[in-house]
Image (cartoon, rainbow, N blue to C red):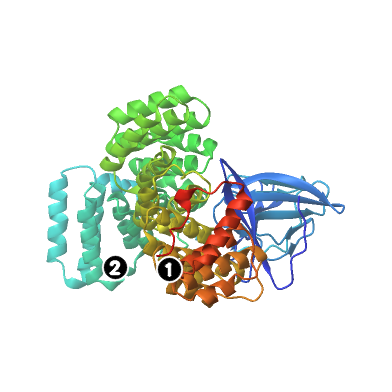
Amino acid sequence: MLRFAVPPGRLVDLLPVAVGEGAGWELAAGDALTPSTALNPRRRPDAAGRFGLTVDLPKPGAATWLDLDGERIALVTTRGRRAAGMSKRQRFVDFELLPSRFGLAVLALADDLAVRPDLDGVAVGREGGLAVSSVMQRAETALAEAGAPAIDPEAWARGRSGNLRAVLRSQFAAAAAAPPGERGPLRVAHARTLIAAGLDLEGLTALETAAADDPLVAMQRETSLWRGLALLRAGRLAEARAALGGDVLQRDSEAVLWRSVAEAGLGLWREAETGFGRTLNLAGRLPEDLRDFVLAAAAESAIESGDIDAAVSRMDAAAKRDPLVRDRLALVKGRVEELTGQTVAALDRYERLEVAAAAPVAAAAGLRRTLLALGTAKMSSGEALARLERLALTWRGGPTEEAIIAGLARSYATAGRFREAFATTRRAAMAFPASEMARVLNGEAQSLFDALYLGGRGDALPGVEAVALYFDFKEFAPIGRRGDEVVRRLADRLVGLDLLDSAADLLQHQIDHRLTGQARAAVAARLATVRLMDGKPLQALEAIDATHLPELPADLRRARALVRARALSDLSRTDLALETIEDESGPDVARLRADILWAARRWRGPARRTRRCWARSGAAPNPSTRPPAPM
């Protein structure tokens, strides 16, 4: 462990970086640094009613206990790309949360304090529970007591039996013949029959027509719930979630249940699981087909949240009469087998579902089979990549497409197809801008970009490809000092390709907008060198003079002096060029003086200095290397 005093007036930052094939940390100091994402502790009671505390920390590592000056401190770092830490010290009875930049630091005040990293957070507790009354937690909205269900099983069954065509015609005619003030409820009854019969879009149209004609109908709870159900069954999940989340339905238990189904379909697993935990008991009051529809979504939510027991119990509670529900629950069963180590059984189930299940389940099963077979070395990376590419072409929408894109981007990166990896990550950000998966992929793309241009992974890339890759995907370039170093290395590649103007433009932007102090002076020397190579000595001289500082390290000052002298010589200002390096010495300086004098056609000086260089090197003069005699 390294401990040091922070200089006054300076901010210190700690960033994860790629070091060769592994990972490391970089300590940076500056006047302005990017703030961390603030972590917020919250209370969480266990089954026995004892209180613990959790902190949502993305991708937590293992807990490490340190003994510092007699105090026990638990450290948990995060593997997330974005810095996350405690913005200020927080004191509790049994422990303290210390200010941190990249993870969590817990100062134990009780001997039996336990700090346990979880999948997406850190739990702090004691065997007998914590005294955490000082933790502020936003109270959950209390749900209203569930009354009569808006979707009654008996009415639902009546809408699905008998001569449906005659019933619908009769209801439509009654609504059309009724006076305007009585037409709204009749249209709603007609809409319910349509939705029960599976004509969801037609029922939605009837509901919206009734609500537009009658404001009282529009304000009714039942109208909103039936509209949300129709949107759900029609696959318009975002609209369903919005329709079921208004002020009227915010505390309605039945609305929360259906809203959780919509959130599960959108891949918002945490929100869905919270809603199911509060309202899933209401599913028993629904018609059987709707109950299975809800239980299938709840089982998917549980398995995605890592709760295998809840997934199994919800799966077992479903009647599984509907073929699509049966396929969805079979996929959940495969996920359970996969998570419990039954790889062969899971692969076999996925393969059967991929061939025989409905299209949404077949696509998800194909994805799970590919990823599991690749992870267990039962499928080659080339075959897996080809399968993922086919899936990306044949399936659109929902969490399945997100997972396909994520698997494709990671497979491309592993295969060294960096352009496709970055393009696929960009596609994920465009298709799912608010998705957690898109944010994770963006962080992985930034790490890959860092490894390519700073970690040595991209050394084998041809120069043209490396330059093109940077300019096509520079939104993934690291920020701060590491981003500046990427630009400087890229400028060197541009010079190697003889693209001197482009290299100079990159370095000029760094000088004008990014750098200060010694770093700016050093990059200015590189810019001046590029300008000289491009035959622009005046611009080289301007770059050196515009970044002059009185106090610079000796080696940097010397390098700038040599470049400045060369620029002055190319401008035919011989005496000023010689004066610039009169206090410098060394073989390179002697050769530069000879070049300056030679360019000025002062023949005696170059000949004398050339003989000195030969004498120092111990090499005999070669007549072919001597300058020609002056004419």
Horizontal arrangement in the rendering, residue 18 relative to residue 630 (left or right): right
**Between residues 623 and 193, which one lies in front from this camera angle?**
623
Residue 249 can be seen, yes or no: no
Q: What x and y, as percent, mark residue 349? A: 39, 26
What amino acid is labelled 1 in the image? Asp
Q: Label 1 belongs to which residue?
A: 247
Considering only vertical position in the picture, is 88 above or below 347?
below
**Between residues 416 and 208, which one lies in front from this camera angle?**
416
Horizontal arrangement in the rendering, residue 604 relative to residue 28 (left or right): left
What amino acid is labelled 2 in the image? Val
Q: Label 2 belongs to which residue?
A: 217
Residue 360 can be seen, yes or no: yes
Horizontal arrangement in the rendering, residue 284 relative to residue 95 (left or right): left
For label 2, the SS is helix
For label 1, the SS is loop
Considering only vertical position in the picture, is 104 above or below 584?
above
Circle 1 packing at 10 Å, graded few (<14), some (14-19), many (20+), is few
Depth check, mark 2 against mark 1: the one in front is 1
Q: Residue at x 21, y 60 (%)?
A: 205
Q: What x and y, as percent, mark residue 525? A: 53, 66
Q: What x and y, as percent, mark residue 456? A: 51, 45
Considering only vertical position in the picture, is 288 above or below 25?
above
Q: Residue at x 23, y 70 (%)?
A: 212
Q: Which quadrant of the figure has residue 324?
A: top left
